[in-house]
Image (spheres, coloured by chain):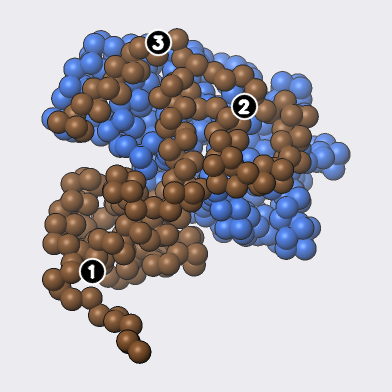
Chain colours: A blue, B brown
Amino acid sequence: MHEYTYYPGCSIKGTAKHYDESLISTFNALGIKMKELEDWNCCGATAYFSVDDKMAIAISGRNIALAQKQGKDIVAPCAGCYLTLRKSLEFLNDNPDKVENLIRELAIIGGEFPFNIKVRHPLEVLINDYGLDKIKEKIKKNLGDLRIACYYGCQVVRPFTDFDDPDYPTSLDKLMELTGATPVDYSPKTRCCGGSLTGTLEEVGLRLNYILLREAKKKNADVIVTLCPLCQFNLEIYQDKIVKKYGEDIRVPIFYFTQILGLALDIPIKELGFSRSVIPLNEFFARV
Amino acid sequence: MEIERKVKYEAELDKNFLREIIELSHCEEIERCIQCGTCSSSCPMAVYMDYPPRKIMAMVKEGFKDEALRSFTIWLCSSCYTCTVRCPAQIKITDVMYALKRKAIEDGVYPARFSIPVLDKEMTKIIQSTGRNWEIGVVVKLYLKTNPFGLLKMAPIGLKLIKTGRMSFKKESIKNKKQLRKLLNLMKEETNA
């Protein structure tokens, strides 16, 4: 029985609602159970570590302790949440002497210390716990000649490298292959999208996303599939600006991997959040 | 006419800087940097930086405190961890960059209206008060503080998000704010002690 504690994260309540919708319906269809973490708080992402690392560890520590009380591994779909929680968990378990007072409080909240739960990403759960063979048995719809650029981004494959290769990972490609689609050889698959730089230094942010979109076009990809709310947002939302700035038609739909997997599991389209795409999907739906 | 001095004398260097950054970053390995440049060649931001990461490592090692803390480089690091996983000396370069950002904020040596630290600070403020980040609230505050007219340019994107139901106007909040505040205060006391 696969049971986990779901840590949605703040983006999923806003710009990434379709990640939430498609993840939940996909996991339901596969019989993977998730219970939302009771009263979770924001992970703080990269921002908190830039301002105050002790407080950053404290707010993530609260989430980890609450999850310890619920007793199951955390599943965090956002790459930022996944990394922040995992980094904080490692720090707390390895350095209790550096934050003694915090540990005392967290042990009360969580009921024990060291914490014995893990922080997981849904892709890794599908590959390692559920297994590609079992997913293959559940595939009902062949996505045919769809060409997919699998974009992993940064923080799911780095700095923790125990799940896949940090430069050229293949787990998402293997998962997408099960749908009958063809993953293209996408060389910048782990090149950074710039994260929040699109908002703070737009010139730099647009350039980074242009490089990623241009390469997908060059490889004749019909879609780019992502693992992270920030990557999805950056690659999709700024396409008009990028077309205008670079004078190249690099428009391509950007999905979450759970949306494509959900399609192949024959989950109704309206349960997979496709209506939230700002890119027109007529061409895409004509193909699948 | 006075010729601009390009040389920094040893007496002007901050001998404690390396120790300070090692402690802040929990990364003893900085001392082992061999200046190979793997970090600079791996960094997707290096072309936009004033000093590439390799130079920052050298500055930290030798005590060029002002140059490192006032650099644009540390704020451009987007935490992609490519340098960290490739460094042959196992230096956690991303964590060193975080330590430099914190030190720059602490010493007040970053441009006040520069958008990146402003975003970081605004986000921590909202988390401290509600326990949750609020995307639209943070973005609006960021623009008001750094580039008020930029908000107008964001309108088309805002409309798209509203149309697709991806803009959350509700400011979310956790229930047990007291618990969160207690943990944060605990860390504040420790830092001040």
Question: A161 above or below A114?
Answer: below
Please provide percent x and percent y for residue A281.
81, 38
- Give amino acid for label 1: Ile
- A56 left or right of A261 in image: left
Chain where mark 3 sits: B
In the rendered view, does A257 fall on the left or right side of B192? right
Position of residue B40 measured from the top left corner of the image (x, y, whole percent) = 39, 66
> Which element type, helix, strand or loop, lies under badge 1?
loop
Disc 1 versus disc 3: distance between alpha carbons? 48 Å
- Name the secondary structure under disc 2: loop
Mark identifier at residue B34: 1
Q: Residue at x 61, y 19 (%)?
A: B170
The residue that mark 2 highlights is A14
> Which residue corresponds to mark 3?
B176
In the image, which is nearer the foreground, mark 1 or mark 3? 3
The amino acid at mark 3 is: Asn
Q: Nearer the viewer, residue B11 or B99?
A: B11
Q: Residue furthest front?
A: B1
The amino acid type found where label 2 is placed reads Gly
Q: Residue at x 61, y 58 (%)?
A: A203
Observer-nearest of B82 and B170: B170
Give whichever of discs 1 and 3 has the lower sequence position. Answer: 1
